[in-house]
Structure formats: C-alpha cells, structure tokens
Image (cartoon, rainbow, N blue to C red):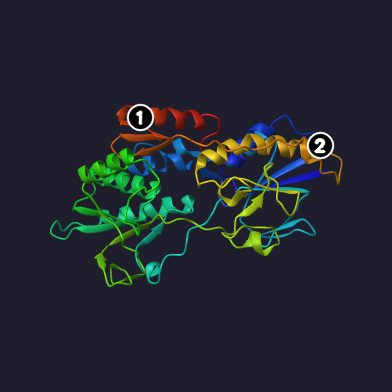
Amino acid sequence: MRTLLLVGGGHSHSLLLRRLRGRLDANTQVILVSPERFAPYSAMLPGLVAGHFRFRDCHIDLGKLCENVGAELVCGRVENLDLESREALLNNGQRLSFDYISINCGIQSTSPPPGASEHNCLSVKPISQFLPQWQETLERLYSRHDRHKGANLAVVGCGATGVELAMAIRYRLDHDPRIKVPVDIHLVHSGGTLLAEAQLEAQLHVARQLQEMRIRAHPLFTVTRVAEQELFTERGQHLPVDEIVWCLQGSAPAWPGQCGLTCDSAGLIKVNAHLQSESHPFVFAAGDIASVSGQPLPRAGVYAVRQARVLADNLIRTLHEEPGSADRGKLRVFRAQKNFLSIITCGDQYAIAQRGRWVMAGKWVWRWKRFIDQRFMAQFPHP
C-alpha cells in the first residue's frame, strides 16, 4: 500500500483530487490534511464581504470532495516533516506516514507591527480565520448608535486584495441597515502608487472608483506601531482608527526550510518544472508555497489552478513507477503563461479587467467574472 499525503486544501489540491478519481489503483491511499473542512475560494472573498455571495457559494466542501474520490480528510495543520522517515507531524501531535507528499498549504500572514494584537485588528490570511473575525468587526460596528461619533476603518495594503476589500467593505456598510453611524474607510499603503504593477489606465479606473466610493488613500504611510486606536509611522505620522484590516504580502511558514527541503530566500519550496522538490524527489509543491525554478511568478491564484493538471499527472505517473525509480523524463513540464487575466472587483458589481496592455471596465466585466467564478465552483461539492 502506497500513501500520497496532500498538505493543504488549496486550489491546486482541490482540482488535483477531482483529477485523481478513477486514476489510482487499489494499492494507493490518499490523505488530505487541512485545517478546515470548508476551503474558501479566494477570488470570491470580496464579493462575500460585500454581500453579493453566500458562504456556500464560495467554499469547497473538502469532506465531500474526499469522499467522492475515495480519499481521507484529516483536519489539522502540518507543523513539520521528518523527511528521512517520511512522516508528517501535525499540530495535534498526530503523525502520518507517507510515501509521496504534495504541499499546497499557501502562505501565512506577515506579523503585524507592535500593538496590533491588542487592538481590533484582523488579517486576511488565512482566509478561513478572516471570515469569523470580519463578522465580529461587523457586530462591533452594529453596536455603535451615536451618530455624532462615527468610526474609522483602515485597510492596510495597496495590492489588489487591499483595494478590492476596501471597496467591498464600503459597499457592505453603505447597504447594511444595521450600521447606524458613518464609517470612514482609509486605504493605507507604504508605496507611492496603488497597484504599481498594473497598467496606468487600470490605476486611473481604480483611483476614480475609490474617490466615488469615499475611500481615502494614504500613500507612503508605513505602519510601524499601533496604539490607542491610532496607526503610527516611524516619521511620526498618525491616523485614528477603530478597526484595522491587514492585507499585507504574506510569508512562507518556517517548517519547509526547517525540515530540510531546499527553499529560496523567501522560504518558498524550490521545485523544478515538474513541480518536484529540487532536494527530495518524493516531495511535490504547488501554489504560493512553491518557487518554480527558472520561472519567477507573481502570487496569483491562476498559477495554482493551472499547476493542478501538471501536478495530478506527475503524481499519478510517479505513483505508478517502480519503487526507487525517478525517471523525470516521463513527467510533464509546467510552463507559466506570460500574461493572465486579472480582474479587480469594485464593490458595486463593477469590475476592471486587465491582460497585458488590454484594460476594460464596467458592470459587464463584473458579470463576466461572476460567470468565471461560478463555473469554477461548479466543479466541487458545496457546503
């Protein structure tokens, strides 16, 4: 009996499980380790926050998915690997043996500055923890009734996630009758330009939407400390806040490097074009946690989705090989596309699309994105 251990229920592994159905022999068992049973589809998070979607619309039921393909779901989080004995150590003390392992656990939130944990601060990553904390934020805002004392909510981070969430929150608060006080939303970022890597036309569309939605941007504002309901910079700048949402770039967990896997300078697992660890051929990795040799990629869900097909085929071919063989010539190669479609949603069922130099915006783009997302989610069982 051979065991394939899947670490994390990210997009690559969700699609991988679908492709494994009927393609494994009776001598192979598959175990998925995930901290939660319901895996959120990150592309639909802003729509969920805005109120356009329900929980079940944008979550994959990993329990049902595993059941459908004959895999086992273990709820837990991998904290370390023993690569010599091929065992995974979980946060609950459980040990799982494996012959081959695939890692798609994503990245974790970057630690916020001093003082953040003592105040009303929530982080986008991991998304599964963000959603209940977001509900607590709403409950605190619902409890405010003095119209003369408004609230300030800061979204920290200038990437697409921060921009989308700021507009989604604005839309939600403007259309929620339980909000009795005015809430000012601030988009705080350390750079000089929002979405610096986007085309100028897309940046102008975003700036116009932020202005229309009464969201104030604070460029060159690097938060170094949180205290007394205020954000502070090392230059002495300060901004009063009641609620804080952190959308800063995440970082890799420490355990892949600590267990002996070859990682890059950012702590991401280095894999070859077959998505196979450069140091341990029985280890595969995909998504944000993986660094593909010779293909530096921005963090985008589209790559995790496209890697799933290659990952599935290579794992199946590896499992069918004779023990100890490592004929990489039989494995498929992952080649990242140079340009991919990027769509930024703007709260009010309006969106901005970009691919290469091509930029379009409008309500029809939002409907187009909804169709793409719903088609993706239709592949999986829902809660």
- The secondary element bearing badge 1 is classed as helix
- Residue name at image x 76 percent, y 34 percent: 24
Amino acid type assigned to the residue bearing label 2 in the image = His
| Residue annotated with mark 1 | 365
Q: Residue at point 45% right, 35% down?
A: 57
- Residue 192 is situated, as x and y percent measured from the top left of the image, at 32, 56
Q: 330 above or below 134?
A: above
Task: State the residue position of label 2.
Answer: 320
Q: Amino acid at mark 1?
A: Val
Let me know if residue 177 appears in the view.
no
Residue 2 placement: quadrant: top right
Dot 1 crowding, Cα within 10 Å, few <14, some 14–19, many 20+: some
Q: Is residue 11 left or right of residue 225?
A: right
Whether 12 is drawn above or below 224: the answer is above
Q: Is residue 296 visible from the viewing direction of this image?
A: yes
Task: Count the numbered circles shown.
Answer: 2
